[in-house]
Amino acid sequence: MMAEDGLRPPGGAAPDEWCLHHFDHLSAELAQVMPDTMARMRRLCPVARSEEHGGFWVVSCYDAALAVAQDWPTYSSAHGLSITANPGLIRNLPVEADPPEQYIYKRLVSPFFTPSAVARLEARTRDLVDGLIDRLIGDETEGSATEGRAEFMDAFARPMPSRAFFELAINAPAGHLDRVSYLASRSSTPQDPRARECWLGLHQWVRDFVSQRREQPQRGDVVDALIRADVGGRPITEEEIVGTVQLLILGGLETTAGALGLAMVRLCRDRELQQALRASPDLIPGAVEESLRIDPSFVCVGRTAVRDAELAGQAIAAGDKILIHWASANRDPGEFPDPDRFDPGRQRNRHLAFGAGPHRCVGSSLARMNMRIALAELLRRLEDIRLDDSCPEQAIRYHAGLTRSPLSVPIRFTPASR
């Protein structure tokens, strides 16, 4: 650990030796100093070799990240995504498949997450958001000068996307939500000692859920489509259904919760941004894009080279593991002028928060809609949002791994008059 070894320099980033040879995406210390450390990685060596976890390459610049993501014949998802051990119970589909097989699975779920399909959920999502805000502030305080307090992650950021996905997208039992959210969050944090147990629990829950849905009337959702699908002219297998639903859950819960938490931290530290977005709500879609770029919750993903290649001057050998660091690529000054400035009006914003290439996130429209409605309603109904005095900004902790989200964001606010 960087802090235990006294390696963290005064500037906040990890030291050169760590960046160049011992980069560890699972380090809890990295989660705390990620922007500064990844800026140093881009300057030192945009494609660096780490000796951790058996050895892997870290891709931190935009052009190389995009090249790896788009060159699936060289950098495979099917041949392994993990830089660390995982239970390997079942393939998460379609992400753990390469084209053309990957296209088959992605086409099964894509129609349910198109912009037009997501737009049909907007009114119900807004009602859900308003209900959560009602409980967050308490009906008796709204419209008064009474100060409110809340733990934002527990009261809003986690339940909002989880309920939207559970209730509106896959029609899962609402009573199971808390457990599944817990399992998804823990299983996405490899260094958590409960990660394997939670992987097993999530896997079993999905199997049971699919089995129950087979016996129920059709609801016309993505789960029904998967249960009755053909794959390459044959009926889809149980393993393929479970793997696809499992990935939808992992992608639909924790990542959006993290993105909302990170957006709230930024709003709390920038009162002028709050006021600008309240005064000009038309800036909120741009603010969502900028938040996804500068503070993404899905920070990195693995690939495996299946043939020798060259990347940014480095010789990549067949079998090498590659870590694409989306969060670092999103702050590359070669692609984004003044990359550390939050600019809701940024004209060119080709961020990689949802990945790129064949495996670009199928749920991006749903995540954008959730964030847009959430931010608009929170800013409309809460004023003077700030971090609670008991938790200064530097005290906020983040979980580390392929995703990065605040563990807790305690806030204070004044309820606005409706």
Image (cartoon, helix red, strand yellow):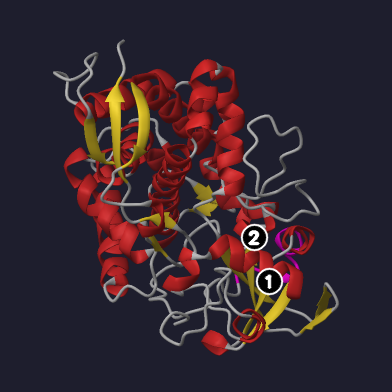
- Residue 57 versus residue 122: which sits nearer the camera? 57
Q: Earlier in the sequence, mark 2 or mark 1?
A: 1
- Any part of residue 200 in sight: yes
Residue 96: tell me if it is visible. Answer: no
Q: Which residues are magenta?
A: 68-78
Label 1 is placed on what type of residue? Answer: Met
Under mark 2, the amino acid is Ser
Q: Residue at x 35, y 31 (%)?
A: 168
Q: Quadrant of the C terminus?
A: top left
**Percent of width and height locating residue 164:** 35, 34
Q: Measuring 30% from the left and 52% from the top, which residue is drawn there?
A: 391
Q: Under tag 2, what secondary structure?
A: helix
Q: Quadrant of the N terminus?
A: bottom left
Q: Is residue 74 above or below residue 95?
A: below
Image coords of residue 298 (percent x, y)? 52, 55
Contact, mark 2 vs mark 1 (Cβ under 8 Å)? yes
Residue position for label 1: 41
